[in-house]
Image (cartoon, rainbow, N blue to C red):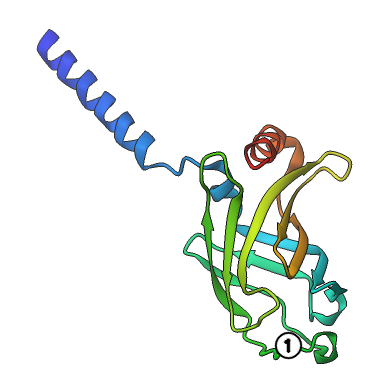
Amino acid sequence: MKKNFKGLISIIALACCIHFFSCEKSIAKRNITGLWVIDTLIYKGNNIKYCLGNNAISFDKTGACTVPEVIRFNCTSDSITNRRNGTYLFSEMPSQEHKLELNWVTSIFKGNHNLYFINNTQRQVLMAKIYSDSLYMVVSKMLVNYTQQELMIRQIAKETR
């Protein structure tokens, strides 16, 4: 009986270890996925938020993302195509900023950007700043119950600072 009990404990411990090490460790990486509302969009010093067809950007778990369509082409001198789908790569290094690489044909969003999350207690929302030399974007996460997720939101904002 003791032998079977020890075997069962060993199997449970092994299963827990496998589960622990296979889980996504970064709370920031897990929470970039989802639908975000663009609150601010400045490209090369110009506010171009109103040049877009909508103000939503989404990231999924597979690395695919969707950006708004550009509807006013006089907002930037860069050549723009309206390919809305692209890919992203989220990376983080210990003691360094989090990076978000966005790959699109559209030059507005394309490039390597710094990223950090913000706990906006006044609006009760998870926000993120995505910025580089040419792009400054502030986004708010949609469909998050702030009251239920407040601890996680505080943790993610702390992790990316």
- The answer to whether residue 146 shows anywhere in this view is yes
Neighbor class of circle 1 (other Cα within 10 Å; few <14, some 14-19, many 20+) is: few
Residue at image location 54% in from the left, 49% down from the top: 29
Where residue 96 sits, quadrant-wise, is top right
Q: Would you say 133 lies left or right of 49 here?
A: left
Horizontal and vertical percent position of residue 110: 62, 74
As drawn, 16 above or below 22: above
Residue at the extreme front: 133
Q: Secondary structure at mark 1?
A: loop
As drawn, 33 above or below 83: above
Q: Nearer the viewer, residue 154 or 130?
A: 130
Write down the residue under mark 1.
78
Q: Nearer the viewer, residue 40 or 15?
A: 40
| Figure quadrant of the N terminus | top left
Horizontal and vertical percent position of residue 43: 79, 73
Q: Nearer the viewer, residue 31 or 80?
A: 80
**How many numbered dots are placed on residues in this image?**
1
Horizontal and vertical percent position of residue 116: 68, 49
Horizontal and vertical percent position of residue 95: 56, 39
Q: Would you say 102 lies left or right of 54 here?
A: left
| Figure quadrant of the C terminus | top right
Residue at image location 50% in from the left, 65% down from the top: 63
Q: Amino acid at mark 1?
A: Asp
Residue at image location 52% in from the left, 42% down from the top: 26
As drawn, 70 above or below 86: below
Where residue 70 sits, quadrant-wise, is bottom right
- The answer to whether residue 1 shows anywhere in this view is no
